Amino acid sequence: MTFLPAVFLQSASARLLSLSTVDLIVVVLYFAAVIGIGFYLKRFTKTGEDFFLAGREMTAWVAGLSFLAANLGSLELMGWAGAAYQYGILAAHWYWVGAIPAMLFLALVMMPFYYISKTHSVPGYLKLRYGEPARALAAVSFGFMTVLMSGINMYSMALVLKTMLGWDIHFSIWVSSLVVALYVVLGGLLSAIFNEVLQFVLIWLGALLISIIGLIEVGGWNGLVARIHQNWPNGDYTHLWRTMGHFQDNPMGIHWIGIVFGLGVAISFGYWTTDFLVVQRVIAAKDLRSAQLAPIIGSAFKMCVPFIVILPGLLGLGVLPFHLVGENEVHAGLHSYNEVLPLMLARYCGPGLLGLGITALIAGFMSGMAGNVSAFATVWTYDIYRATFRKQATDAHYVSVGRWCTILGVLVSIGTAYLVMQFKSIMDYVQALFSFFIAPLLGTVLLGMLWKRTSPKAGFWGLLCGTVSSIGMWGWVKHDPSALRYVALSPYAKDMAENMFRALWSLIICVVVTVVVSLLTEPKPEAELKGLVYGCTELPSEANLPLWKRPIFWAGVVAVVFVILQIIFW
Amino acid sequence: MHRSEMISIWFFIGVLLLVYGLLITGAGLYQLFDPPAHPVVLFNLHAGIWWGALLIVLGVIYVVKFAPRKKDTNR
């Protein structure tokens, strides 16, 4: 066996890592495995229910891991590791307060309505609850933004592979996206979910070693804290809440109100409970109990993700012999915050392990992209094509349309990636656009599920006003940056605070408009709300189940661990 | 129902982990006897060997437990 030279570091302009033969074999085997699984599952994907909802036969574990993997994109891994280097343990808020309460809420409160209504999508639920206009608004915005975001992620990943490994950017874009297209076209959501479970396992096994060896190097958590204090005496990088009292006391420039209500309520609940990309995975579960347990299982693992994402960033603060800088300050000899994960990979992982780490990043990218295109295919086929063009067609016809939509989605994503390559400012606009819909959609769905008085017109107008107000606030701050003091309630607020407070305001506006319009317009008859709204829906009893089999028991366990983590790292 | 004939995803995962484990352990053993000129930090731990061994153990467990010959209800 001959190895190429082991891992080495070069200047920022050259590649960061060099793969040996065994590393390349590991990566190639991964591609072969996901394509092989796609071909294998094609024979089981015959009906629309199979293609779009994986036959609604997933176990709680498979649905739960897939639910989380669809969110664990490689950019998420690298981006939040970089954020941990930049902001310290504050970045863990996005995994804890910014995810766990929302995931548990989805499981216990919202999942019964998604599942019992037998909807195939979140826009589909809006159709049942509010009618066609609300569905159309949500479906078009979701479908459009999903493929654009997928393209941006694709471009960013190709850029990462170019920087890390020197791979050609066009090669990375086409090979990885065509592989995703192939296995999703072949097996639909079934294939996407199965591969996401595989990808989830690889992400953990590929990234976990960095944290384990890193902690050995620094002498455990206390040793890491001591090293960070020694290297960065002027900052507090190891406390979650202690610096949240004032905007100017922490590197994020944010206040605890923004974190708790903006991130923890508006953004987090909006994303985890109404973004169809993740919700689709749990409504594919085999029964209601599995559908409720799936987000709880996902939340338990989500709580552990900082161990493979945030900890490497903190270890970078403690052990790297040089300081990383922002993307705009990178020049020869310097590395950006976002490179902390590959730098740590290079520090600890020899041949084979490096290939596994790179495979973890590629798997993260592919699971995120497969999530996007499978959700896109479902929403466009059921909520746009069937609702607008062909209301009465055969099931086989819709499966065929779903397959073509998958290819179309990938091609649009590739087109977006090339567009971003030419005009990089598009990336900021599209990411902002995506965030416009998340928080107001939460208000619309939640009021629809919990308040039977909410009227169809209110659903549409609340969603529209919330979205437009979010766009308005974003445009205001873009035009006049000093307006941030009004949106985020402080002259010391920074960009991160703007996102949190904008989401919070748009949610409030959506709720207020929905309530006011509901009180002025006719509600739906109660008979039509059966299976859709609390108080009009008979929820199955769990009285016959032992305590340890009930979703609420496990949600309680996760909630207790969540609180303990907040106290430990306070 | 065709679902009962489907091979568990955990079997595929087991096979891949087993192959990865063999490759990574092999690479680790090779480096044990022929150390690289520029070793990684904490090379003396030989992480490749024990991490590869862990993958082999996990792979074997999943392959045996979810082998296609068994009737599968846990996808």
Image (tube, coloured by chain):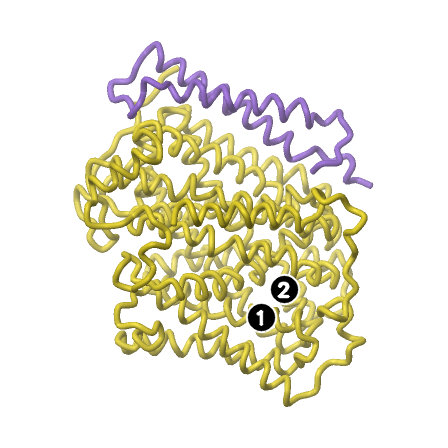
Determine which of the numbered discs, if any, sits on residue A122 in the image: 2
Disc 2 marks which amino acid? Val
The answer to whether residue A184 of the structure is visible from this angle is no
Determine which of the numbered discs, if any, sits on residue A138 in the image: 1
Q: Chain of mark 2?
A: A
Q: Is residue A250 left or right of residue A372?
A: left
Q: Quadrant of residue A453?
A: bottom right
Q: Quadrant of residue A117?
A: bottom right
Give how far across and how far down residue A530 sits, in percent. Answer: 78, 70
Disc 1 marks which amino acid? Ala
Determine which of the numbered discs, if any, sits on residue A525 in the image: none
Q: Quadrant of residue B42?
A: top left
Give how far across and how far down residue A438 sits, in percent. Answer: 51, 66
In this view, the residue farthest toward the bottom is: A520
What secondary structure is marked by label 2? helix
In this view, the residue farthest toward the left is: A332
User: Label 1 crowding class (10 Å Cα cut-off): few <14, some 14-19, many 20+?
Assistant: many
Give how far across and how far down residue A538 sits, in percent. Answer: 79, 64
**Number of marks:** 2
The answer to whether residue A400 of the structure is visible from this angle is yes
Give B2 or B50, whichever is nearer the viewer: B50
Say whether disc 2 or disc 1 marks the residue closer to the N-terminus: 2
Give B16 or A309, whichever is nearer the viewer: A309
Q: Is residue A444 above or below residue A564?
A: below
Q: Which chain is purple?
A: B
Q: In whole angstroms, how far apart are the C-alphas of marks 2 and 1?
A: 8 Å
| Residues at marks 2 and 1 touching, judged by CB atoms closer than 8 Å | yes
Q: Chain of mark 1?
A: A
Q: Which chain is yellow?
A: A
Quadrant in which the N terminus of chain A is drawn = top left
